[in-house]
Amino acid sequence: MPRLLGGLVVCAAGVAMMIRAELGLGPWDVLHQGLAVATGISVGVATILVGAVVLLLWFPLRQRPGVGTVINVLMIGTMLDVFLGATTTPEDAWVRWLLLLTGPLVFGVGVALYIGAGIGTGPRDGVMTGLEQRGVPIALARTAIELSALLGGWLLGGTVGVGTLYFAFSVGPVMHVAMPRLRAPWFPPGAAPRVLGASGH
């Protein structure tokens, strides 16, 4: 449980770093930020609400969430609001670029930590698994949903930029390197949940 909770806190820190950089977010975080802009709720609350809606899709797809899945929905959004409430966007451009370059790396390590705990993956990955079991190619399903989240968030006012591309291409390799090293010792290598994309949370 400490490994799970620590990983989720690290994930939230990585997302907060990218939000403060204001140079582009990952697709789902574009949606979360866009909902926050459009409705006036916080980004963290938007993250929780979207996660809860996605989690509801598990049931018609006959997926069974783990404890970590439910905690994921609640914890990342909560900690994201904590980090954003304690920080502001830096005025210096080089600091913002540093946050952009570091944020996805921090996020990827956080995902590797909480998945490596073996208590449940993020809500979005369960939807992808369920669709795959029903004959939808996983690459097609993941791409369509990620692009839909990105487009919807952008239309609502979320930040799309160079950071969006950087996030897409950097998080996967970070997780690939980090997961074998951060997997819990009681969690056999062959039993790790499949990582279906870079969104993680």
Image: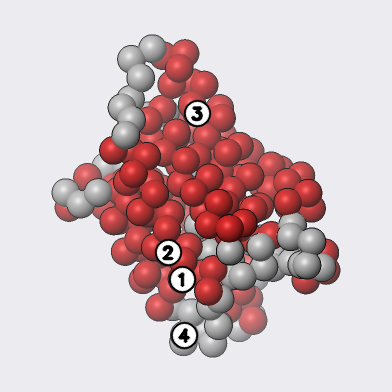
Viewer-side residue, 173 vs 190: 190
Q: Earlier in the sequence, mark 3 or mark 4?
A: 4
As drawn, is 33 to the left or to the right of 54?
A: left
Residue 134 to residue 16: above or below: below
Q: Earlier in the sequence, mark 2 or mark 4?
A: 4
Q: Which mark is residue 70?
A: 1
Secondary structure state at the residue bearing disc 3: helix
**Which residue is tagged 4?**
59
Q: CA distance from mark 1 to mark 3?
A: 28 Å
Q: CA distance from mark 2 to mark 3?
A: 24 Å
Tell me which corner region of the image, top left, top right, bottom left or bottom right, holds residue 24: top left
As drawn, is 193 to the left or to the right of 145?
A: right
* Residue 14 appears anywhere in the view: yes
Q: Which mark is residue 73?
A: 2
Nearer the camera: disc 2 or disc 4: 2
Q: Position of residue 91 (x, y in %)?
A: 33, 15
Q: CA distance from mark 4 to mark 1?
A: 13 Å
Residue type (three-letter) at the residue carrying disc 4? Phe
Residue 102 to residue 178: above or below: above
Tell me if label 4 and label 1 are in contact, CB under 8 Å.
no
Crowding around mark 3 (Cα neighbors within 10 Å: few <14, some 14 to 19, many 20+) is many
Secondary structure state at the residue bearing disc 1: helix
Residue type (three-letter) at the residue carrying disc 2? Val
Viewer-side residue, 144 vs 195: 195
Tell me if label 1 and label 2 are in contact, CB under 8 Å.
yes
Q: Which mark is residue 100?
A: 3
